Every structure is written in C-alpha cells, then in structure tokens.
Amino acid sequence: MANLLVRNVDADISQALKERASAHGVSAEAEHRRILEEALLRPKRRSFLQVLADMPDVGHDEDFARRQDEATPPVFD
C-alpha cells in the first residue's frame, strides 16, 4: 500500500476533516482515505444514451397516450 502526504492544506480544511472524522468515529487519516476512495473509486457516470438503452420495453406509445374525457372541458380554453 502506498503512502500519501498532502502539504499546505488550509487550516479550515484540516479542521473540517478532523470534525468529520470525529462525527464518524474514526481518525482523520481514516476519514481522509474514505473521502479519497468515495471520490475516486465510485462507478463511472453513464451517458444519457446508455440510461435510455437500459430502460425496459414496457409497451407501445399508444399505451401512454392521454385520453380526453368528453365530460371534462379543456383547462386552458
């Protein structure tokens, strides 16, 4: 496992890291590792096209067409 040394960190950032670590019940070093892992090893974002391609085929366009009720007058007329 590699070592990582971060220099010239603003005092406010260092204090925020310590407070966040304390809130999670871990050391500042462990919290730093966790933040780096969450930021760098999370799954890659999918494109909009990939999301659309993964949607299941649930019917035909006609299945989702709006029906006009004869008894209800149009709202914006």
Image: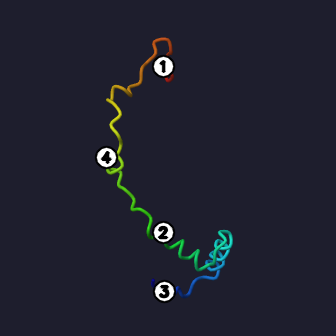
Label 3, on which residue? 3
**In-front residue for pair 51/9:** 51
Q: Residue furthest top?
A: 71
Tag 1: residue type? Pro
Q: Where residue 74 is drawn, which disc sits there?
A: 1
Q: Quadrant of the N terminus?
A: bottom left
Mark 3, secondary structure of its residue: loop
- In this rendering, which labeled residue sits more in front, label 3 or label 4? 3
Q: Up-down: is 16 above or below 51?
A: below
Q: CA distance from mark 1 to mark 3?
A: 68 Å
Task: Determine the residue positioned at 50% across, 15% down.
Answer: 72
Q: Earlier in the sequence, mark 3 or mark 4?
A: 3
Mark 3 residue type: Asn
Upstream in the sequence, badge 2 or badge 1?
Answer: 2
| Residue name at image x 49 percent, y 24 percent | 76
Query: Marks 4 and 1: which is nearer the front?
Result: 4
Most foreground residue, 5 or 2: 2
Circle 2: element type: helix
Q: Position of residue 48 (x, y in %)?
A: 35, 51
Q: Residues within 10 Å of mark 4 (few under 14, many from 20)?
A: few
Q: CA distance from mark 3 to mark 2?
A: 18 Å
- Mark sitting on residue 39: 2
Write the residue at 68% across / 69% down: 23
Dot 3 or dot 2: first in sequence order is: 3
| Circle 3 Cα neighbour tier, 10 Å, few/some/many (<14 / 14–19 / ≥20) | few
Residue annotated with mark 4? 53
Q: Nearer the viewer, mark 1 or mark 3?
A: 3
Question: How far, Cα to Cα, is label 2 from label 4?
Answer: 26 Å
